[in-house]
Image (spheres, rainbow, N blue to C red):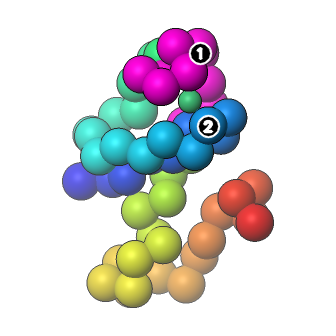
Amino acid sequence: MPEWKCNKCGYTLKADNPPEKCPMCKEKCEFLDVSCYIPECGKTGIDPRLR
Ligand SMILES: [Zn+2]
């Protein structure tokens, strides 16, 4: 299951699809797929927007 991170508050959650509104900041945030932070992912790609 992918993991999503709010680009405003950094809240993360696991879901098939990112929520429309962030439960933390209660705003319509952009959720970024951060699944590939974990080594088990096997990919080397990390979303450059999170650096
Ligand atoms: Zn948020």
Magenta segment, which residues?
A: 22-31
- Judged left or right of residue 19, residue 25 is right
- Judged left or right of residue 22, residue 41 is left
Q: Nearer the viewer, mark 1 or mark 2?
A: 2
* Ligand 1 visible in quadrant: top right
Residue 8 coordinates in the image, percent (x, y): 67, 34
**Residue at screen point 49% across, 41% down:** 11
Q: Amino acid at mark 2?
A: Cys
Gap in angstroms between the C-alphas marked 1 and 2: 12 Å
User: Is 23 within the magenta?
Assistant: yes
User: Is 43 within the magenta?
Assistant: no
The image quarter containing residue 41 is bottom left
Location of mark 2 (residue): 9
**Residue at screen point 24% across, 53% down:** 1
Q: Residues within 10 Å of mark 1 (few under 14, many from 20)?
A: few
Element at label 1: loop
Residue 28, numbered circle: 1
Q: Amino acid at mark 1?
A: Lys
Within 8 Å: ligand 1 and the Cβ of disc 2? yes
- Judged left or right of residue 26, residue 13 is left
Residue 38 coordinates in the image, percent (x, y): 40, 77
**Which is more toward the observer, 18 or 8?**
8
**Residue at screen point 57% across, 45% down:** 10
> Does residue 14 lie above or below 9 as drawn?
below
Residue 47 coordinates in the image, percent (x, y): 65, 63
**Residue at screen point 41% across, 62% down:** 35
